[in-house]
Amino acid sequence: MLKIENLHAEIDGKQILNGLTLEVGAGEVHAIMGPNGAGKSTLAYVLGGRPGYEVTQGSVTFNGQDMFDLEPHERAAAGLFLGFQYPVEIPGVSNVQFLREALNSQRKARGEEPLTGGEFLKLAKEKAGLLKLDMDMLKRNVNVGFSGGEKKRAEMVQMGILDPKLAVLDETDSGLDIDALRTVGEGINSIMRAPDKAVLLITHYQRLLDYVQPDKVHILAKGRIVKTGGPELAVELEREGYEAVA
């Protein structure tokens, strides 16, 4: 589903990714772990198409299509979802309004009919229930006044509504307490665990992987994958640290 080959990328002239190669198949969950500055968030931003990140070498294909031929909104319509480490606030725009416009925009790009207001609210209520998020929260402005845990749960509701094929989740566990961590983990499983979907989960810690069991764990250091293993690698990292394992 996702194939990254010899990817090099820089920002403001500083090289961050240095020959990263990675393949994620349909039905798989892959976790990427690594120290600060390793290039984890840069990888997520390059995949999402964030401005300012320049790819200098390598290729990325998503379901056989060259991802760099697509604008960010086209990547989203093709089924890519990027979860942010720090979800932004959008004053003056309600979650319901934002999510309905986003979903119908993607449906239009795929040649599908837009959802009516009633159809959308039914879908939103279903997905909010999975993340234990009150529908009243979705009537509020996007992330304004939300706690860290509420922002992350709201973002997972967004993922459920948009129903992507590939979710790239950048430190989704950041700022979550124990209960919220469990809820978010269960939400990821219920939304993305399917034979035709895949997850690239970027995290510092093993704790989220207790709930979202990965098929593979990769260590990213100095802009490239330096070691790959099973879920036991994350446990080893937690116990020994990056220097000892990588």
Image: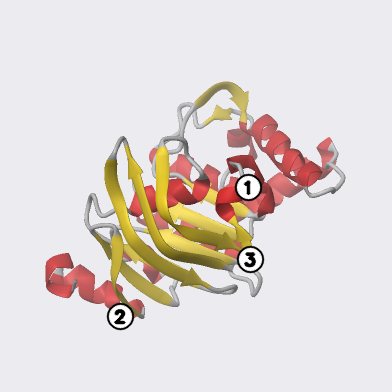
Along the viewing direction, whichever of 96 and 131 lies nearer the viewer = 96
Q: Is residue 71 left or right of residue 233?
A: right
Seen as rendered, the residue at the extreme top is 92
Distance from disc 2 to disc 3, alpha carbons, whole Å, reads 31 Å
Q: Position of residue 5 (x, y in %)?
A: 44, 66
Q: Nearer the viewer, mark 2 or mark 3?
A: 3
Q: Position of residue 7 (x, y in %)?
A: 40, 59
Distance from disc 1 to disc 2, alpha carbons, whole Å, reads 32 Å
Residue under numbered circle 1: 76
Q: Is residue 53 left or right of residue 37?
A: right
Name the element at disc 3. Answer: loop
Q: Quadrant of the N terminus?
A: bottom right
Name the element at disc 2. Answer: helix
Residue in the picture at 48% in, 71% down = 23
Q: Residue 64: give its label.
A: 3
Mark 1 and mark 2 lie on one chain; the one further toward the N terminus is 1
Residue under numbered circle 2: 232
Question: Are the residues flagged by discs 1 and 2 in contact, CB closer than 8 Å?
Answer: no
At label 2, the amino acid type is: Glu
Residue in the picture at 70% in, 45% down = 124
Q: Position of residue 161 (x, y in %)?
A: 67, 49
Residue in the picture at 62% in, 47% down = 70
At label 3, the amino acid type is: Gly
Along the viewing direction, whichever of 91 and 183 lies nearer the viewer = 91
Q: Residue 182: give its label.
A: none
Residue in the picture at 45% in, 44% down = 84
